Amino acid sequence: MSENVINNLIQLGYLVATALFILSLHWMNTPKTARRGVFSAIFAMVIAVLATWAQPGITHHLWVLIPILASIYPGIWLSQVPLTAVPQRTALSHAFGGLAAGLVGTAKYFYWISHEQEMLTAFRMTAIIAEIILGYLTFTGSIIAAGKLQEVKWIPQRPWVYPGQNFVNMGAFGLAILLGLLLIVWPNAGWSPFAFVVIILLSLNFGWMLVMPIGGADMPTVIAILNSFAGLSAVAMGFVLDNKLLITAGALDGSSGLILSIIMCQAMNRSFLNVLFGAFGQVQQSAAAGEQKQYKAETMQGAAQILENASSVVIIPGYGMAVAQAQHKVRELYDQLKKRGISVKFAIHPVAGRMPGHMNVLLAEAEIPYDDLLEMDEINPDMPQCDVALVVGANDVVNPAARTDKASPIFGMPIIDADKARQVFAIKRSKNPGFAGIDNELYFLDKTWMLFGDAKAVIGELVKELSGGSGMH
Amino acid sequence: MALFHIRGIAAAVLLALLVDPTLAADSAPAASQAHAGGHKSLDLTAMLYVFLLSTFIGVGVIMRVSRLLHTPLMSITNAISAIAVVGAIIVAGGQNYPIGIRILGAIAMFCSMTNIISGFLITDRMLKMFKSREGAKP
């Protein structure tokens, strides 16, 4: 009787948690209510943990408590990383999520096969196979993604490719699926546990092989896809454990990853499959080396003067700004220009940076009001009226070849129309082509002037010119 | 274009999910509980409904999230998907589980809790930084 009451309370707790998770994501729709969303999600998570822990079947309390205590320090440490490192932290947490799902699936299978074989129905086996394949491939795939983002030495930044790669990858994946199907039919044969372990190994292997050939510029999409996988592995776990809260929360995460990947793919005019199997960025290198064109470099004084006389400036940030940690200097430049009554806006391309929304977070960190951060579609109609477009470490997202050059690998990708501004300044680390290895016509236009150097140093110089200059005039 | 692919994949997955419970329902009564068999397959359908509906809700809610907040969105959904902690608690703390299996559960527990703590803390840390031009109000 009392056990029945407890069970009903637990189910009620799960229901409340589901509602709170949905509300939490609903409140994320504007910065004004977003923090409320975090609190409601935390509340939901606490309910979920306590309700599960309160189940009569949970008796080894220390086994629950010790991992919780152990996770406090790394959890806090991972939440304090610099904001430029947020993409790799996110990738790492996808790895953790995938590993957790994989381990729970593994534990459940081995428990059932040795204790309650009648639990291994075809449906449950399907769910377990899906859970472990998704979980383990997300684990190794995300670790490689995190390593690439962190620019760890032993993981190449450029796509890593060899002939027949897709064939090998798909072969490994296909084999895992095939073994999975066999297991669904014969879940408890003598060889089944071995086949299970082989599936785990194949999935672990497939995960890293899938991400290795993908270049840094595609990381926003890859992270979003891995996000989706981590969510789907939680859904599969829900089917395995007969737990509807896992299904709903996992589905929320899965659909979030799905939508973000769609947005990322559309912003690059590419398909999922092309991102995963296209090995973007290595083919064009040789083509770019062909002709030598001349850049026009501008001095800091000259650039500062032109900026001072402008009435509207649009700043287009890219990954180069994040690498150089230039967001605070950009803020100083913003202040200097604002002080002179110049309108300053930021044009944010959806794939600028290394994860969705990366630029917005960095600029918010530098306390630039979010009303001045505009999306590509909002700002493009105003670009012809803009006096100066200042490109800070962005490259492909302002390359006009995307509009005109059918042969270009980025043809068809929506871009920010920097070339339509009256004048363009582009800050660039070196004279080499950008990440995708493609020459950028924007840099050779008559109205474009280059400012070579580290983004932080260059903007620092500009700020110095502007703050020194204003006193003398 | 991209949308087309995704719809195709989604449809295929959905089809696989819809076909499978019939397989499961066929083989379930043969296993043991003859009278509970009907109830079991009903529950599977219910779970699939839950999955379907929550995906639709998820898509609807997330489409409306401001693009400004896509990074915090990803970190909060990340923390939410660490709901895998529920499975980890069951495996790590469950009465009847042998020790080897509980160790797997404890590792999963550690991974999920790390995601929960770091995910929520960093989301809040980022959201605090978003200020509108009028200032103060986050």
Image (cartoon, coloured by chain):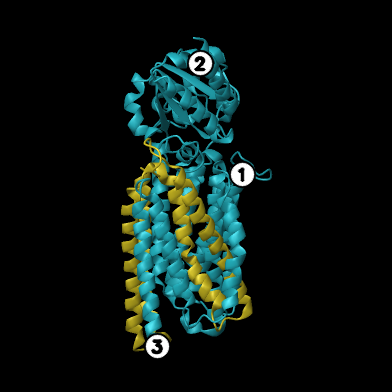
Chain colours: A cyan, B yellow
Which one is in front, A68 or A242?
A68
Q: Secondary structure at mark 2?
A: helix
User: In this figure, which residue is indicated by the disc labeled 3?
Assistant: A2
Location of residue A127 by image quarter: bottom left
Q: Secondary structure at mark 3?
A: helix
User: In this figure, which residue is indicated by the disc labeled 1?
Assistant: A150
**CB atoms of marks 2 and 1 within 8 Å:** no
User: In this figure, which residue is indicated by the disc labeled 2?
Assistant: A304
Q: Residue at x 36, y 89 (%)?
A: B34
Query: Mark 3 falls within which chain?
Result: A
Q: Secondary structure at mark 1?
A: helix
Looking at the image, the residue that sits furthest to the top is: A473
Name which residue type carries label 3: Ser
Q: Is residue A430 above or below residue A358?
A: above
Q: Residue at x 34, y 62 (%)?
A: B54
Q: How many marks?
A: 3
**Is residue A119 left or right of A294 when viewed as pictured?**
left
Q: Residues within 10 Å of mark 2 (few under 14, many from 20)?
A: some
In which quadrant of the rendered image does the N terminus of chain A lie? bottom left
